[in-house]
Image (cartoon, rainbow, N blue to C red):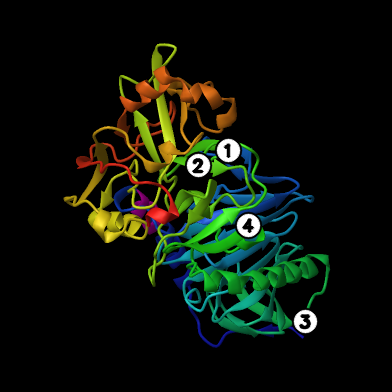
Amino acid sequence: MHTLIAPVRRPVRWFAFALVSSLVAASAHAQDDPPARVGRVAETAGEVRTINPEGAWDTLLRNQPLSTGDRVSTDKTGRATLEFGSTVVRVGPDTDLVVTQLDDQKIRLHFDHGQLAVRVRSDDIPGELFIETDEGAWVPHHQGEYRFDRVARGVLGAQAWSGDMLLEAPDSSLPVKAPQRAEVWRTGAQQATHYRTVPAVKDAFGDAVLAADQADDKLAAVNVAMKIPPEMTGAADLARFGAWSVSGALNVWTPAKLPAGWAPYQQGAWSWNSPWGWTWIDDEPWGFAPFHYGRWLSVKGHWAWTPGQWGAARPVYAPALVGWLGGPALTLDGAPAVGWVALAPDEPVFPGYAVSAKYWNALTDASVAPASRRPVAIPGRARVTPAGAATGANRAVPGALTVVGSLALLPHVPVSTMPGPRGAELRKPAFVAMVDKSVAMGPPAAPVGHTALSAGAATVSMAIAPAKAASAAAR
């Protein structure tokens, strides 16, 4: 039976709020610190596309970060798994989803059509997560598993496998509690909201989603034991691809089955992503959290990653955690060159955009011990740049340093194909002497066709501390 909902009339509240939220988010990107929270493309299958900065359709890549304005679209063969901190969003075939707001206050996702499943794993997220539809915004109230379907235009299916959520429609509200499923639509000149309860749907999409959620649950205990912040995007599935251990004072994760000669920030490509600039996109299925949080170090001759000491604070996303080096002395075949190496514990990152003192401290303090922090005065917002010779403890690890021609550093080009020294060439005395004369620098300038970050912002220099041994024993 069709039942009209009209207990409370709210003519334009949700639509106006959604529009204002989007405008505020866009303004924040231009004027304030970048958000600490980010999304991630964890898995894709079949055809999954997005709209690139040039306005054209482009393939959505695994480990690509997601921020306000990003769109995820699948065809009849496509599937995608997205992560926003502890929240997991599974996108089915023939589905269109837009990230309308993603910042430290809200996660707003606009679901247009197709199949969508949302897993809320943390009690901190209800009140921050909104699934926007043409009928209104769905707000989960507790941890749970939720599903949305729109196959026929005009009718939305919303189901709670577990937990409960509330539809905030323009003219009314509707609670849906597990195991309920409702169908919702709007009709007439006033676009009145209607609904009906229907039997829960059981199909291949739902079975796959619930099985994947159960597999994630089995890994949750490991993350708790290793004190991994639940809102660290991409960290939840690391136990699937490696082993956690304690080394000295650090909890460290060691990836399994690495090829010989592997080093961080070499198997993948750079991308230019607003509002962060140069952003690392790694090839490995686990390659998100270890390249955007924490630090890398050598433990008994093997690469290991430590997430940092975040305590109760939410982790702050960084586009890449490398030390950049360059200067007149660093050249390849007589042309300017640029290099980078993974940061080790106690080494600060120098972002390519202006930051406030609060943001700088939040970005740095989790991975730099108090005794290693160097004072820096940031007036308002400013770009913090390194001053002095290029150091970096991981430069002592064989094969850790990457150097390429400055003109070869282009977005979406695999680093492995960029011209530059490899293997034994990195150990030649003449090359080592040249690198020793290089200077520390911030990220390179924006590539051709992209807007420079924080134009006109003040610059603050910070002296680089001498490198420490990048080993757990040194901690």
Q: Residue 242: which disc?
A: 4
Q: How many residues crowd around disc 4 within 10 Å: few (fewer than 14), some, or many (20 or more)?
A: some
Say if 94 sits above or below 7 in the image: above
What secondary structure is found at the residue carrying circle 2?
Answer: strand
In this picture, residue 415 sits left or right of residue 206? left
Residue 194 showing in the rendered view: yes
Q: Seen from this angle, which residue lies furthest right?
A: 203
Which residue is rendered at x = 42% and y = 60% of the image?
308
- Amino acid type, mark 3: Val
Q: Residue 198: which disc?
A: 3
- Amino acid type, mark 4: Gly
State which mark lies toward you, 1 or 4: 4
Q: How many residues crowd around disc 2 within 10 Å: few (fewer than 14), some, or many (20 or more)?
A: many
Which residue is rendered at x = 71% and y = 69% of the image?
215
Disc with the residue nearer the chain's start (3 vs 4)? 3
State which mark lies toward you, 3 or 1: 1
State which mark lies toward you, 2 or 3: 2
What secondary structure is found at the residue carrying circle 3?
Answer: loop
Question: Decide: marks 1, 2 in contact (CB < 8 A)?
Answer: yes
Disc with the residue nearer the chain's start (2 vs 4)? 4
Marks 3/1: CA–CA distance = 47 Å
Where in the figure is residue 14, as x and y percent of width and height? 48, 70
Marks 3/4: CA–CA distance = 43 Å
Disc with the residue nearer the chain's start (1 vs 2)? 1
Q: Which residues are magenta?
A: 24-29
Say if 408 sits above or below 247 in the image: above
Disc with the residue nearer the chain's start (1 vs 4)? 4
State which mark lies toward you, 3 or 4: 4
